[in-house]
Image (tube, grey):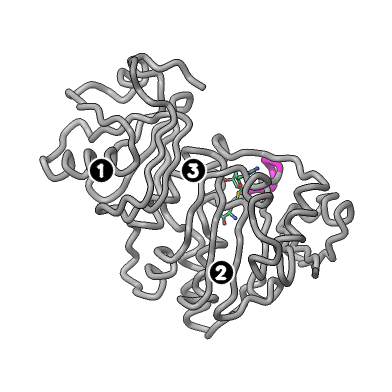
Amino acid sequence: MRNLPYKNTNKILIQEKIKLDFGIQKVRWEDIMIITTPGKSTSKIVGRAKKLANSYGLPYKERHGVSIQTMKNEYRDDIVIVENNRIVISPLNSEKEMFYHPNLALIRAKRIMNEGKGGQEPLISIAKLKEGMSFLDCTLGLASDSIIASLIVGPTGKVTGIEGNQLLYFLTHVGLATFTSGIEGFDAALRRIDVIHQEHLNYLRECKTDSFDVVYLDPMFNKSIDTSDGINIIREEAWRTDFSDELIQEAKRVARARVVLKDDWKSTRFARFGFTQYKRKSSSFHYGILEV
Ligand SMILES: C[S@@+](CC[C@H](N)C(=O)[O-])C[C@H]1O[C@@H](n2cnc3c(N)ncnc32)[C@H](O)[C@@H]1O
């Protein structure tokens, strides 16, 4: 936990069922970020920033024309900048800025929409996703895979995504609630995803047996393997979790049909945990399945 420069601030703020502009449903904070505006901003942006701060129970700080670095020096925390059309995060210990964009998911989704349900999308065929199914994504990241799942399972299905890192959770939670592509079906798929800020093993332990059709795991690969832009944006923040026997046992217990693993094609996790590995000649990552 970082030392905060201000006193009397609850480090753990729990907000239930807040539904303001950002469609926030359930938020739990164990650390604090600062919300501010760009150096030059309109009263509309200030209003949005304050509303976002209020929705998430985060402190709003006036920018007063100072640089983001000056704010980081003062507050010793990550800074969220509410811009006109997007929300940017400047992590305390990084010069890189992060903002939400569905990146590849939009390209993948367009292909599916043009070619009919399924298209050439391996996640769908391997996880055997169909309308009405439920999908638990234990490693949400920027939700590219969850968006594809949401598109397929549709309004009668359910997609829940778990993200442990607070910044990534925030980015994806806000992004899925607000990003607009102009493609109705795509935007609706984003809005349907339930985003949860938790450590995935703890979440699985609390789930009822057989509560999701598919449980999905997509851990971070080694640096040399991850090439997509989205992953590069989150690389510095993303958690790298070792898989335990208990994690896979719990995933199997919670999955009604199958557990799906996406991993480096050389990963030993496929064999170690008994996944059937589907090899894809030209791809640096493979999928594995555990039917339950
Ligand atoms: C490779 S990324 C997932 C990318 C995602 N499939 C997508 O399509 O954007 C892995 C994500 O899982 C998260 N993660 C890793 N270990 C976790 C854990 N134990 N609990 C919750 N999230 C975790 C990381 O922070 C990271 O955001």
Q: Which residue is labeled 1 in the image?
A: 83
How far apart marks 2 and 3 lie (CA) works out to: 19 Å
In screen coordinates, is 83 left or right of 33? Answer: left
Q: Quadrant of residue 133?
A: bottom right
Query: Magenta includes 159?
Result: no
Name the element at disc 1: loop
**Residue found at x 78% / y 66%:** 289
Query: Magenta includes 225?
Result: yes
Q: Which residue is labeled 3 in the image?
A: 168
Q: Which mark is residue 129?
A: none
The quadrant of the rendering that contains the C terminus is bottom right
Q: Earlier in the sequence, mark 1 or mark 2?
A: 1
> Identity of the amino acid at label 3?
Leu
Q: Mainly helix, strand or loop, the magenta region? A: loop
Residue range corresponding to the magenta coloring: 222-226
**Residue found at x 38% / y 48%:** 16
Q: Which mark is residue 149?
A: 2
> Identity of the amino acid at label 2?
Ala
